[in-house]
Image (cartoon, coloured by chain):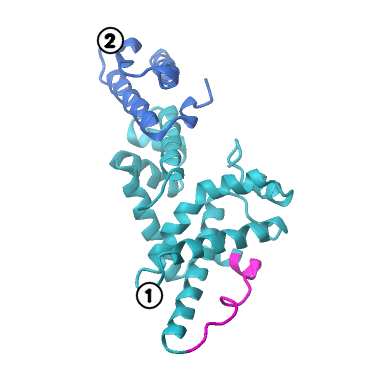
Amino acid sequence: MTSDGSVTGWLGKLQDGDSAAVERLWAIYFRRLVGLARTQLRNAPRRVADEEDVALSAFDSFCRQAEQGRFPQLADRDGLWRLLVVMTARKAAHLKRDETRLKRGGGASPQAGPPDDPDALLEQALSTEPTPELAAEVADECRRLLQKLGDPELATVALRRMEGHSVEEIAEQLGYAPRSIKRKLQLIRGIWEGDAPA
Amino acid sequence: MNELLTADLPPDIAREIDEACNRFERAWRGGGDAPRIEEFLAGCEGTGGIALVRELITLDIFYRRRIAHG
């Protein structure tokens, strides 16, 4: 993210063809997307590389569409993550469907599903009523990320922040200075950004 | 003192700093004399040490101001 945490800043850089923006987003999100794809493909017959292919395909789709300025409503990192979750889930679903067809003797479609419609994707990602499937995926991913923190107190801080509490509110609730909550949130981001699921 | 120096540190060092700061805050909230910053610096050197000193000073100022303002 940019220094002010602005996703719109990153989207602007992507539109300007800034490869550093792509690399930074890749570093932050790719491993998490691979972990999500692995969860999605858990019960599907697959090659080892499939989960990375799914994450790569979703990431590539996002970057190409962002370069074209097709996500004007995307305003923060939470929205970006939800969008990437939806895109990865769709790619994984397409792959599962195609591989099931192959297993049954049918041919895989030349294109993995219909072209992604940015408006529909964004609407789904930013919807206040996520589908049960998406809610389950996000819950799985949340559980995995909270476990990754390895500290119940850090997990509590992360959860309260996700629930929309302010830094000052969390500080008051947990008996810390606001500065310490900011530091803990920074630590949480550092742990998650270095996240590389086994 | 607004920028977090821990932002660019490896998570294991940032975690050590966080734990040292937790102990410092508990000492402040436990009542009694104000804790001494130098007693919370053991084992943290280099960039991590600088970041820890800065965090502890910031917390020290926060608690001294809070006491001063009742």
Residue at 40% in and 16% down:
B60
Q: Which residues are magenta?
A: A106-121
Residue under label 1: A45
- Horizontal and vertical percent position of residue A126: 56, 61
Seen from the viewer's position, the closer of residues B35 and A88 is A88
- Is residue A112 found inside the magenta-colored segment of the image? yes
Q: Chain of mark 1?
A: A
- Quadrant position of residue B40: top left
Residue at image x 38%, y 47%? A159
Q: Chain of mark 2?
A: B
Determine the image quadrant of residue A96.
bottom left
Q: Position of residue B4 (x, y in %)?
A: 49, 27
Q: Colour of chain B?
A: blue
Check disc 1: other Cα within 10 Å, few if <14, some if 14-19, many if 20+: few
Q: Magenta stretch: dominant SS? A: loop
Q: Position of residue B12 (x, y in %)?
A: 36, 33
